[in-house]
Image: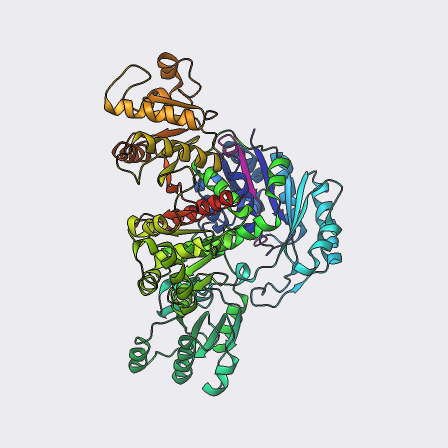
Amino acid sequence: MAQSIYITSAEGHTGKSTIALGVLDALMRVSPRVGVFRPVARSESERDHVLELLLAHDGVHLDYDDCIGVTYDDVRRDPEGALGTIVGRFKAVEAQCDAVVVVGSDYTDVAGPAELGYNARIAANLGVPVLLVLSGRDSQNQAEQLGTTTARTPAQVRQLAALALSELAAERAELFAVIVNRADPAAAKQIVEGVAGDRTPVWAIPEERSLVAPSMGTIMQAVDGRLVRGAERLLDREAYSVVIAGMSMVNVLPRLVEGAVVIIAADRTETLLATLLAASSGTFPELAGIVLNGPFELPEPVLQLIDGFELPVPIIATDLGTFDTAVRIMSARGRMTAESTQRYQTALSLFQAHVDTTELTVEMGLARSTVVTPLMFQYQLIERARSTRKRIVLPEGDDDRILRAASIVLARGVADLTILGDESEIRARASALGLDIASAQIISPTDPELVERFAAEYARLRSHKGVTLGQAADTVTDVSYFGTMMVHLGLADGMVSGATHTTAHTIRPSFEIIKTNPGVDVVSSVFLMALADRVLVYGDCAVIPDPTSAQLADIAISSAATARRFGIEPRVAMLSYSTGESGSGADVEKVREATALVRERMPELPVEGPIQYDAAADAAVAKTKMPDSEVAGRATVFVFPDLNTGNNTYKAVQRSAGAVAIGPVLQGLRKPINDLSRGALVDDIVNTVAITAIQAQGEQS
């Protein structure tokens, strides 16, 4: 039977969807088959945005229609019959999963305590314990996004908890844990102490404005508006306050505040142009957007002038009057979707920072699975990187993929970041993309003080090559050299580059400056191959075309160390076209000599070679060909005899077996530098930053 959890609340607007996303994400880390279920949805015609959000999470493979029990109309018509339908449909989902996240109703169509009671009855009949979500904010007016709600005191939260718990007990629902969401950070400890029972876990998550603030897209829907100018991506921006620009330009400008949506009458074109100029100037607060109200079209000359701007904000038009526009904006609710990347990542980061996910999964009876799916492995990378944060330098700050990845890395707390480039341009571009990289350090590669320092060090390192100080100064302004010098001098712990530069351009500076580890003569690479149920290490698939036996031994030893660093017990297979003593020839002898060198240098390391891939990977074949080997049939590290074989094999496995290939991960350097494919996706960049941070932890442990 699946280990499931029922997430419900005592009122509306608690941020229950954020909690559900965090719980789902935590369960995906330890279990390969996690499902979601929504017992009561609004209607059959309107898609449930919470369910869609959860189903969009990587690793959830269920159909939308299968994950819904009944609608509110069904409950009103026949509560008992609806309950029976819910139980039956839930059991069908449960049968397909190891764990199920059940998300209770939203207090939109049924009011008051009766809804909590019905959710409690559902949970009791499903046999699923309840995770109760309480709000740390008083949302009676439901106009909470733009600062109109007040924080509840610990006493008020305790009183609300007591009422909710009595309702659960009355319906014989089992309590699993309590989360107080949107809590006052200053009172979080007292809130937890006030709610905590003898053995019930209680956590408090502080208020995060960006999660409850409405986006400009939500505001556009609320005012029945239309986007008249500005990129659609700008509609993802959150609005934190409202400014009604009903006065002259000189009086409007001082009233502009950070994150504001500015309401301007559509016939006040001088105010519109002044606001746009302020938004573009860099000397005024950053705005969320502009809403033009009233049934007036902008004159053609004004539109022509606006089209000359690179608009930093969206301009929305509505036919509503000023009062109605303001009321609708103030009542708009923030909504999290899988497409709102920044909000999504912020929600996960907040949950992980304030909820003990290990305790949560253990209390649910979910120990870590021996199966490791690609998604679980990627989660493990993020967890390990977060455990001891390192600073990673990203030299390619002019690439949008780098900025998007940076916002995710920072939101998830994966690493601290330094981005190279012009600070004003990078921050403006990030703002235009709706990304939050405020905590990133941004450094110009032409910073005179650092260039002088780096040039002196580079000239010293390359003096044997006749490099002068002037030549060094020219060299270190190249972003790859600048970033590598930061790592060399301890200003960063590692570097990730290659999204817009060649591999040679990325790693050549490391050969000159960082150098190799003691006892290792070559820099090589591995791919971490995440198969359906395990992770293997393939090397070398990216750097050394035709390694000698000594270089193969280096690759094997470095690959084993890399495997161990990422939690993979190394059992090394030195691959060839023959197994054991069955073959001969120069290529086989090279592998045989390399295997002997590995055994001589690392006698404790399990290694076998020469060995064919099938004998290394398949226990049945190994039993026939090498029955006494501790590696055959159980290999985790596969060392290929040359780049041609390795590169083709990793790509064949990636495509034919559906494996996720993470890498290349460079190894052998004294400090971590990693290269990206120029076709790298945002997720690839995030993973590589996490890998580099983990390598940096190992270098300094």
Q: What is the x, y in percent for residue 388?
A: 55, 47
Q: Residue at x 35, y 50 (%)?
A: 512
User: Is residue 44 visible to the viewer in this orientation of the structure?
Assistant: no
Q: Is residue 183 visible?
A: yes
Which x, y percent locates residue 674?
38, 47
Quarter of the image where one finds residue 358 = top right
Magenta-colored span: 93-109
Q: Is residue 355 left or right of residue 483?
A: right
Which residue corresponds to the image point at 58% horizontal and 42% vertical from the top-left? 78
Quarter of the rendering containing residue 572: top left
- In the depicted structure, whether residue 223 falls above or below residue 73: below
Observer-nearest residue: 88 or 700?
A: 700
Query: In the rendered view, does 16 fall on the left or right side of 462?
Result: right
| Number of numbered discs visible in the structure rendering | 0
Give me the residue at 60% from left, 55% from top.
14
> Does residue 171 lie above or below 498 as drawn?
above
Q: Look at the image and say whether residue 94 sits in the magenta stretch.
A: yes
The foreground one among 383 and 464 is 464
Spot occupied by residue 257 in the image (x, y as percentages of width and height): 52, 75
Q: Nearer the viewer, residue 635 or 572?
A: 572
| Of the pair 534 and 525, the residue shown nearer to us | 525
In the rendered view of the protein, which quadrant contains the N terminus?
top right
Residue 165 lies, in percent from the top left, at 72, 46
| Quarter of the image where one finds residue 183 | bottom right
Q: Residue furthest left?
A: 585
Q: Is residue 166 magenta?
A: no
